[in-house]
Amino acid sequence: MTPTNAASVRPGDAEERAEVVVIGTGAGGAVVAAELAEAGIDVVLLEEGDHPDRVAPEAPPLVRIGALYRDGGMTGTIGNTFIPVPLGRTVGGTTTVNSGTCWRTPEEVLLRWEREFGIPSLAGGGLAPEYERIEKAIGAAPVPEEILGPGARLVRRGAEVMGLHTTPLTRNAIDCRGTGVCAFGCPRRAKQSTDVSFVPRAIRAGARLHVRARVDRVLMEGGRASGVVATRLDERDRPIGTLRVRAPRVVVAAGALLTPGLLAASGLAPRGSEVGLHLRIHPASRVVALFDETVRAWEGVPQSLQVRDFEGEGIVLQGIWVPPQLLAPTLPGAGPEHEKRMAAVARMASFGALISDASEGRVRTIAGRAAPWYRMNTADVRKMQRAISLLSRIYFAAGAREVYPGVRQMPVLHSVAEAEAIEQLRLRASDFELMAFHPMGTARMGGDAARSVVDPAGRLRGAPGVYVADASLFPTSSRLNPQLTIMALAARIARGMIDEAAAARAW
Ligand SMILES: Cc1cc2nc3c(=O)[nH]c(=O)nc-3n(C[C@H](O)[C@H](O)[C@H](O)COP(=O)(O)OP(=O)(O)OC[C@H]3O[C@@H](n4cnc5c(N)ncnc54)[C@H](O)[C@@H]3O)c2cc1C
Ligand code: SF4
């Protein structure tokens, strides 16, 4: 288990001092904490969740979801449809439950962030040093052929028939055995999520981690950050005291759905500010296919392969598989028909489609809870139709007998013609089975004070000593899976803080 400060779980009030307090141990927070601690800075790291090791590796998926995800995995956006957006709430944040895919943000997107939003040195290799360091630290490498999994091989077969290209995904797993349960926390600690990589590094370098410490407010004194106050929680999330950390620098890395609320609760989201706006989520869907042959799609890495031929249209197809108990409610039919389908689960495969969204939402806080609102616009609905249609066609090309596209009007497809017809339907967002895994953009970074919440060094505007270092920073959709870029930006922000400390000789 990752070492922790034992005092953090004893009842009562406590107070500590540090040079920097970091809120959140996910992709952003853990990287900042490790970088600062390794530079000799005194860091306290606060995490609302508990260690992932507190739940048995062999516990059923639903039990692990209850322990490792926020609100049992039931977080999501409301708007023109409900879109589940699950979030990790554990040491490692959402990286602990993610699929491990690591992509650099495409060059055109970085160029846009540089030119349109005034963030220097991203494109043309500007962010490459940070990417390289992070990739090395988390062992990012293409998925080896032998653990690609039978579901991915079927998609590759269909894609080849259609003249499309597939590539194994780059993932941050070392000695991965393809056990297929990444989304419930890797039982082998093969996946180099931040609970395995950067949090232990931070602690080895002297950072103190407090788990079950939910930060309520960033404290400001004389117009500058002076620390945070957190509620300490027992294992049933009941308050057992407060923890006050006095620190002249506070890094907020609670994730794109929670950072805005924390800033607002701290009086750091003044009226008219952009805090909480510009939410993007990468809406995603899943297509399931039934084959005559045995597939055993649970074998191998669930997200191991991708099709990027349609990236220019804002569509990326990537692997996904969930265990039968989670698949069951999404399969069409009821009674004996559904039973028959479930009995054939060993002959099923599934794959995901995610779209780079032009739609924007926002996060408000209602009764102390994040209330994200997101309306999927018509252009994104059309993109999703096309993505699902393409994936269904790939499955038929691979020899599928039936395809379940997750579209209300056409729950079961029997032919390529039906798969093509999906593109012609007049669908609404609520006609799909949607999910989203990449919330971003709610405290965006930029050079223009009127259009950004955070400056290019990660400093929250109008709040000296407060930094933001998580997915909130992204000015637009990153188009691909975001964790690597969150980590790279966090590393850059930490480097700026270290340089600042060195210039001042001491903080
Ligand atoms: C199932 C799933 C699969 C995914 N797969 C991939 C993938 O393959 N590749 C990829 O790039 N991305 C993937 N993602 C997304 C990726 O994991 C996230 O984008 C990334 O982890 C976000 O980093 P973050 O630092 O912004 O927030 P998080 O990683 O969510 O970390 C925020 C942390 O802050 C803590 N926190 C929040 N509020 C407080 C508070 N008030 N006090 C104390 N602590 C607090 C939270 O508990 C959490 O631990 C996936 C997501 C999911 C849900
Ligand atoms: S496939 Fe299994 S071993 Fe590999 S990263 Fe996922 S959970 Fe860990």
Image: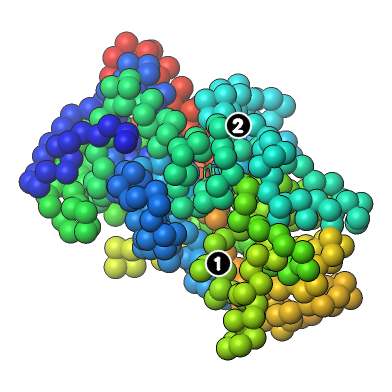
Residue type marked 2 = Ala
Left-right relation of 16 to 73: left
- Locate residue 253, reporting x and y percent: 40, 42
Residue 56 appears in view: yes
Q: Identify the image's colour scheme: rainbow, by chain, secondary structure or one colour.
A: rainbow
Left-right relation of 308 to 437: right
Residue 362 appears in view: no
Residue at the spot of label 2: 140
| Kind of element beneath mark 1 | helix
Give the residue drawn at x 64%, y 81%. Answer: 340
Instruction: Tell me, yes or no, whether the two marked residues, 2 and 1, touch with CB atoms within 8 Å.
Output: no
Return the disc, 2 or 1, that comes first in the chain's sequence: 2
The residue most toward the left is: 12
Distance from Cα at disc 2 to Cα at disc 1: 29 Å
The residue most toward the bottom is: 335
Give the residue drawn at x 23%, y 27%. Answer: 18
Q: Image quadrant of residue 134?
A: top right
- Locate residue 372, reporting x and y percent: 46, 64
Image quarter (top left, top right, bottom left or bottom right) of the N terminus: top left
Relative depth, front residue between 207 and 456: 207
Image quarter (top left, top right, bottom left or bottom right) of the C terminus: top left
Give the residue drawn at x 12%, y 52%. Answer: 240
Residue type marked 1 = Pro
Is 475 located above or below residue 81 in the figure? Answer: above
- Locate residue 207, reporting x and y percent: 29, 26
Q: Residues within 10 Å of mark 2 (few under 14, many from 20)?
A: many
Q: Residues within 10 Å of mark 1 (few under 14, many from 20)?
A: few
Give the residue drawn at x 84%, y 53%. Answer: 157
Left-right relation of 314 to 22: right
Mark 2 against mark 1, which lies toward the viewer?
1
Q: Image quadrant of residue 100?
A: top right
Residue at the spot of label 1: 324
